[in-house]
Amino acid sequence: MSANPVRGEAEIRVRGAVLVLRPSFAALVAAEQEIGPLFAMVERAADGRLGLGEMVALFWHCLAERPEGLTREGFGEGVAAGGLAAATPALKVLVGQILAGR
């Protein structure tokens, strides 16, 4: 499966696998329940104060499909191992979707 930018999806590579992030309403609500208001998260991201845990939580809830055996801990470690620079494009897409209200 590859990301559909028309649907606001993004891709992130974690441990060699390309995973699709889909910011559906249900996914964003779940992320918000965990990390707090999404607009406050966007403000922290814009100020360079977004924590790795918050970003991983957003990504985790937005995963379109979770590969068998992928745990939240393993996913977080994979995102961290890939580096923030590699995760930033996906974060930018999701933040854009949050701000656009799609």
Image (cartoon, grey):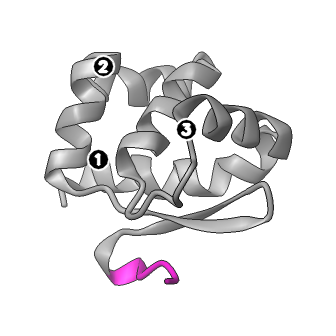
Residue in the picture at 41% in, 31% down:
42
Tell me what residue is drawn at x 52 percent, y 83 percent: 2
* Labels 2 and 1: the sequence-earlier one: 2
Q: CA distance from mark 3 to mark 2?
A: 17 Å
Identify which residue, 56 or 99, lies in the foreground.
Answer: 56
Compute the Cα span from label 2 to label 1: 19 Å
Q: Nearer the viewer, mark 3 or mark 2?
A: 3
Q: Dot 3 corresponds to which residue?
A: 71
Secondary structure at numbered mark 3: loop
Front residue (pair 86, 100)? 86
In the rendered image, residue 37, in percent from the top left (x then y), is placed at: 24, 21
Cα–Cα span, label 3 and label 1: 29 Å
Across and down, in percent, residue 43 comes to: 42, 24
Q: Quadrant of the C terminus?
A: bottom left
Q: Which residue appears farthest toward the front when viewing the image?
A: 69
Badge 3 amino acid: Thr
Which labelled disc corresponds to residue 34?
A: 2
Residues at circles 3 and 2 in contact by the CB criterion of under 8 Å: no
Q: Is 100 left, or right, of 95 in this rendering?
A: left
Q: Label 1 belongs to which residue?
A: 99
Q: Residue at x 17, y 36 (%)?
A: 29
Q: Picture coordinates of residue 100 (x, y %)?
A: 25, 56
Q: Is residue 57 left or right of residue 76?
A: left
27 sits to left or right of 84: left
Q: Is residue 47 magenta?
A: no
Instruction: Please determine whether, in this image, residue 66 is positioned above or below residue 35.
Output: below
Magenta segment, which residues?
1-6
Is 88 left or right of 50, judged from the image as shown? right
Vertical order, 44 against 68 (above or below)? above
From the viewer's perspective, is residue 67 above or below residue 69? below
